């Protein structure tokens, strides 16, 4: 699969594998390291304290900086800054440079809690999340994504590992916008993200997909919460699958799209290859309700789930439309029901020149500086 993806490192997890240099204790003019929060292929995320203010933050450091990885970090900083004031996205603090090594690091809001993947893992032997809790999570996530989309930012890698949970689930924050794209830039757009959460149009290599790839991913997250942490479109195999295999996983649950249900489907790059393969038994039927019967999910809740997990993006719910659904008319926690004030964006502390990249949509910092916040 040509998708761009990388190991996730949540703010309160430690990834398995070989150690990197990122979690060795270091010090800059402003921050002291406190603990290693996670490691991945990019480097590490550490918890640190600003010595001047005492504020605890999370710092993302690169293990082996290169022109591409530095440009990616700048790009991620630009997207976080574009999302400033969004209460359901991790906040941007600064870009800083280590005075001795000159290495660039991204300073972000620290969330004291696990990511949603580990949050669900810890509950795997207990009762599944009740529908009311799933509804509260989804209201926050959809609100966060609606605000991102209003700033023309599409995350492209929404999954439980990129959602931080704190205060026993009262605090929910989307993180890791490193694979985001700005739809201000014209298509074609490339594949990006984690296959189990990728929308069908992206898997089919549609070059002009839009923000609805994020609402598909949120539908996958909603199903996973209801299923006690089991990914809906995964058969428990390796993390790597190709496009056709992942489309097969979707078809076995939702049925095979065609020109009637999705006008233009036959013209998509991989549609013919998909149609030539043996299809799963029952591929002409949608089995979503069988997996989430009424005793598990109400009629109104199922309408939201089905609306998010609609293969034809033209018929899929946007975040804004999903939030207007009667399912969300039920009482919400007071903190979630109140619109939080928009935070003034913090200026970028340091912007080194970015090397040009191939096959990656660029998002100049100057463009984000011009965006209203």
Image (tube, rainbow, N blue to C red):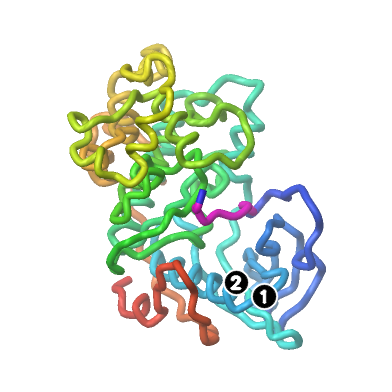
Most distant residue in the front direction: 276
Q: Position of residue 178 (x, y in %)?
A: 51, 62
- Residue picked out by circle 1: 65
Instruction: Give the residues in magenta.
Output: 2-9
6 vs 280: above or below: below
Of residues 15 and 126, the one nearer the viewer is: 15
Q: Are marks 2 and 1 in contact (CB under 8 Å)?
A: yes
Q: Is residue 17 above or below residue 241?
A: below
Q: Is residue 140 visible?
A: no
**C-alpha distance separating marks 2 and 1:** 6 Å
**Residue 99 is one of the magenta-drawn residues:** no
**Whether residue 106 can be seen here:** yes
On screen, 328 above or below 7? Answer: above
Dividing the picture into quadrants, the one containing residue 191 is: bottom left
Residue 318 occupies quadrant: top left
In percent of the image, x 67 and y 69: which residue is there? Answer: 61
Q: Is residue 5 magenta?
A: yes
- Going 56% across and 63% down the picture, which residue do you hit? 109
* The C terminus sits in image quarter: bottom left
Determine the image quadrant of residue 289. Answer: top left
Percent x, y of residue 69: 60, 71
Residue drawn at point x = 40 percent, y = 68 percent: 361
What's the mark number on residue 69? 2
Q: Secondary structure at mark 2?
A: helix
Residue 192 lies left or right of residue 144; in this view the side is right
Q: Secondary structure at mark 1?
A: loop
């Amino acid at each position: 699969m040509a998708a761009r993806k990388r190991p996730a490192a949540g703010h309160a997890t430690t990834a398995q594998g070989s150690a990197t240099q990122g979690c060795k204790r270091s010090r800059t003019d402003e921050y002291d390291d406190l603990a290693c929060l996670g490691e991945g292929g990019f480097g590490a995320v550490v918890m640190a304290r600003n010595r001047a203010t005492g504020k605890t933050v999370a710092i993302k450091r690169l293990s082996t900086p290169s022109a591409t990885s530095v440009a990616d970090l700048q790009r991620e900083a630009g997207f976080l800054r574009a999302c400033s004031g969004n209460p359901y996205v991790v906040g941007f603090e600064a870009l800083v440079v280590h005075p001795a090594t000159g290495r660039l690091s991204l300073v972000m809001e620290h969330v004291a809690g696990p990511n949603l993947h580990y949050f669900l893992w810890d509950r795997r032997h207990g009762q599944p999340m009740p529908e009311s809790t799933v509804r509260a999570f989804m209201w926050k996530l959809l609100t966060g994504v609606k605000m991102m989309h209003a700033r023309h930012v599409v995350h492209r890698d929404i999954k439980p590992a990129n959602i931080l949970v704190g205060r026993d689930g009262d605090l929910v924050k989307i993180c890791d916008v490193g694979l985001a794209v700005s739809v201000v830039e014209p298509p074609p757009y490339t594949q990006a993200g984690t296959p189990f959460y990728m929308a069908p149009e992206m898997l089919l290599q549609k070059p002009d997909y839009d923000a609805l790839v994020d609402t598909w991913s949120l539908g996958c997250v909603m199903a996973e919460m209801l299923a006690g942490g089991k990914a809906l479109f995964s058969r428990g195999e390796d993390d790597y699958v190709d496009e056709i295999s992942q489309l097969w996983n979707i078809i076995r649950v939702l049925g095979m799209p065609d020109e009637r249900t999705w006008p233009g489907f036959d013209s998509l790059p991989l549609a013919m290859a998909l149609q030539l393969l043996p299809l799963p038994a029952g591929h002409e039927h949608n089995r979503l309700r069988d997996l989430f019967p009424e005793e598990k999910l109400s009629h109104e809740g199922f309408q939201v789930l089905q609306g998010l997990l609609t293969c034809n993006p033209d018929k899929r719910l946007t975040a804004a439309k999903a939030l207007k659904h009667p399912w969300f008319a039920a009482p919400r926690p007071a903190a979630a029901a109140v619109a939080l004030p928009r935070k003034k964006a913090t200026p970028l502390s340091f912007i080194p020149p970015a090397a040009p990249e191939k096959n990656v949509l660029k998002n100049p910092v100057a463009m984000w500086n011009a965006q209203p916040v």
